[in-house]
Amino acid sequence: FRDGAFSVGSVWPSDFTPARREEMPRIFKVTASQLSAPSNKYSVPILADSENEKSEWVEVLSELHRILKKNHFRDRSGYVLKEAYDSSLPLIKTTQAAAIIDPKRIALGNEEGLFVVHITVDEILRVGDLKKVHQIELIPHGQIVAVISGRSHHVQLFPMSALYGRKMSVHKLVETKGCQAMTSGTVCQGARTCLCVARKSQVLCFELFQGKKISHRQFKEVQVPANVQWMAIFGEQLCVGFQSGFLRYPLRREGIPHRMLHAHDPTLAFIARHPEDALCAVEISSIEYLLCFKSIGVYIDSRGLRCRPVELMWPATPSYCRYSAPYLSVYSENAVDVFDVNSMEWIQTVPLKKVRPLNNEGSLNILHLETIRLIYFKNKMANEDELVFPETSASPLRQMVPHVNSKQRYSFRVPKGKKTLSKGLSDLQSAARGLLVSNMIFLNHSSELGVFCSLPSRPLKSPGQSQQHCRRPALLEAQGLKCHPPPISFMSRYFLALKKLVLLIF
């Protein structure tokens, strides 16, 4: 509702292509902004049970938006969304992991290996001969990069200078075969670099050394009650999440693990009774933590007792959680919901379907829609962007052109001889894509809007009103508004665009 591009209204036949034309009078759409760069809007079509119910939903949502604008409700969103790089880059389509190296470089890991993209000059560097990169962990303190790669899921280490094109020698951790996750940090007040690797219900802890060659020493092995689902290093402790629980293990010394959910707190007993997947933990302060499970988020103190009476409830079933202070991003199938962990407020919903985080902070994400995009979530609390954003236009003719003197370097550009067709073809393809994509539909039913949404039985009131009812706009039928088909049908526009595309190419 606070989005500047928010609108709600009826649909035209040119907007969507429903499975049955008789459903058109019962469909309305809610529109909001999706990306700020490039500017992009997203519309959600919703199917009501009847035309009257549709009209009531349009009335209520429009009235709520009018009340918010009238009372000058400020924008409390935590993130601004931008496209990190040109979506026509082939590497993006199969990206499994990513990391921000510096404001001008990002690392992408996929089936083919590890690549560094210099986003301001469109140069691409392939790092080593790695294959099937599943996770990228930058370790600035030790100037080391750790990746989980290969069919056997080994951890491999190499110096951070390799990301800038210098020669490298890979150091393989043989003990980590079959691992599924890793996290890094420092111990001994920042004097030592630590890497923790999870393999099923076991966590191996290594100290890393950077000299002429990278070396390592295993100093601890932790056995977890169930398979590790999440982990991070909080200060001098390793925090591990597993089904229905979290444990903190001391890293510097031997000792028993500390349960983060107290067994004798009756208000938390339901988590142990009903198996809940652990998504993440947030260290709010040295005496307060937020533990996020599949269905709920609870606040506990350093003893494991509940410290806030209210939980965080997710609007939809989450798949992932990511934290970038002070915001918790909860990923579900149809959106990303953002919470302020300090105030416990639900401050933003990002209308992105099938989006998945690529790094631990959630700043880089992959959007799996008609066009697969690499999306950057800019934290508004940050002083400056982690990335710079040059103005680049997506062109279907751009290719990864190898450098003459190096097989590891590429330029992402239009090859010579194809530049004459690039502009006209790009414009036409964008127009044709707009016709096709805008007419695809995945209908939501009004009953699926969630437990938080239902039609009010009374007229809406402004926050400042006490007795006086708000004036509600008349029904669409009373205004004589009906959905008339446009002069040119969707199929006619489709074949016209297709004809122009064929004539331009041939």
Image (cartoon, rainbow, N blue to C red):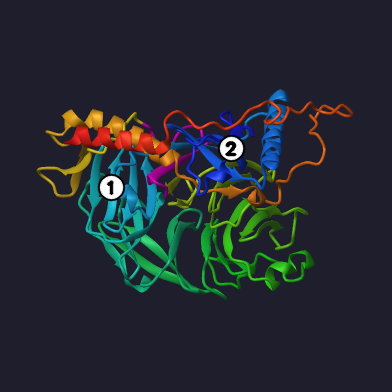
The numbered dot on residue 494 is: none
* Residue 372 located within the stretch drawn in magenta: yes
Does 385 lie within the magenta span?
A: yes
Could you tell me which residue is drawn at 47 percent across and 35 percent down?
14
- Give x and y (percent) for residue 344: 69, 46
- Mark 2 lies on residue: 30
For badge 1, the amino acid type reads Pro
- Say left or right for 111 vs 294: left
Q: What x and y, as percent, mark residue 327?
A: 59, 44
First reached walking from the N terminus: tag 2 or tag 1:
2
Instruction: State the residue at coordinates (25%, 57%).
Output: 212
- Position of residue 87 relative to residue 187, above or below, is above
Q: In the displayed orientation, state which residue is furthest to the left.
A: 404
Q: Nearer the viewer, residue 353 or 203?
A: 353
The amino acid beneath tag 2 is: Val
Q: Position of 276 compared to 158: left or right?
A: right
Residue at the spot 77% in from the left edge and 64% down from the top edge:
267
The range drawn in magenta is: 368-389
Is 426 on the left or on the right of 462, as rendered?
left
In this orientation, which residue lies closer to the viewer: 10 or 128? 10
Residue corresponding to mark 1: 90
Q: Please tell me which residue is depicted at 38% across the width and 46% down the height of the picture.
A: 372
Instruction: Report whether residue 423 is seen.
Output: yes
By secondary structure, the bulk of the magenta-drawn segment is best described as: loop
Q: Is residue 124 left or right of residue 207?
A: left
Q: In the rendered image, which quarter is residue 305 located in? A: bottom right
